[in-house]
Image (cartoon, rainbow, N blue to C red):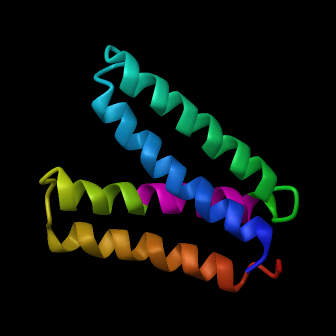
Amino acid sequence: MNTAWFYLILAGICEIGWAFGLKYSEGFTKLGVSVVTVIVMILSFVLLSQAMKTLPLGTAYAIWTGIGAAGTAILGIAFLNEPRDLIRIFCILLIIAGVVGLKVFSGAK
């Protein structure tokens, strides 16, 4: 895996982090959580922009949002007691399949 893909994966993980931060900042009313959330958000964008130096825009952006969406949904199920419906899990798997497909067929190294 080259550096761009590594940056992209880290950016996606940071996106999960700032999504959770938004939940726990309670509308940016908790200062400490809000500051950490904004820092992780900025880091996510910086890492995404570094990945986009090499990777195609559409591929990088779709994978970034896919990691964030699927990861946040999975962690919501695991830690926030969000619904565990079979159709919801199937849809999350579709997002993951799309992310993997974009990586495999992106043509970028």
**Does 57 sit left or right of 78 as displayed?**
right
Q: Residue furthest bottom?
A: 104
Range of magenta residues: 58-69
Q: Residue at x 61, y 45 (%)?
A: 44
Q: How many marks?
A: 0
Q: Does the stretch in magenta take in 9? A: no
Looking at the rendered image, the quarter that the N terminus falls into is bottom right
Position above or below: 22 against 79? above
**Residue 75 appears at what percent x and percent y?**
29, 58
Which SS type dominates the magenta stretch?
Answer: helix
Name which quarter of the figure residue 29 lies in. top left
Residue 7: percent from left, percent from top:
70, 60
Q: Residue furthest front?
A: 32
- Which residue shows up at 46% across the image and 74% down it? 96
Q: With 67 as the anchor, is 103 left or right in this view?
A: right
**Outermost residue, right direction?**
53
Q: Quadrant of the C terminus?
A: bottom right
- Above or below residue 50? Residue 56 is below
Asked if 70 appears above or below 15 in the picture, the reply is below
Give left or right: position of 29 versus 7: left
Task: Tell me residue 2's x, y (percent).
Answer: 78, 76
Residue ID at (33%, 70%): 91
Residue 22 is left or right of residue 58, and the answer is left
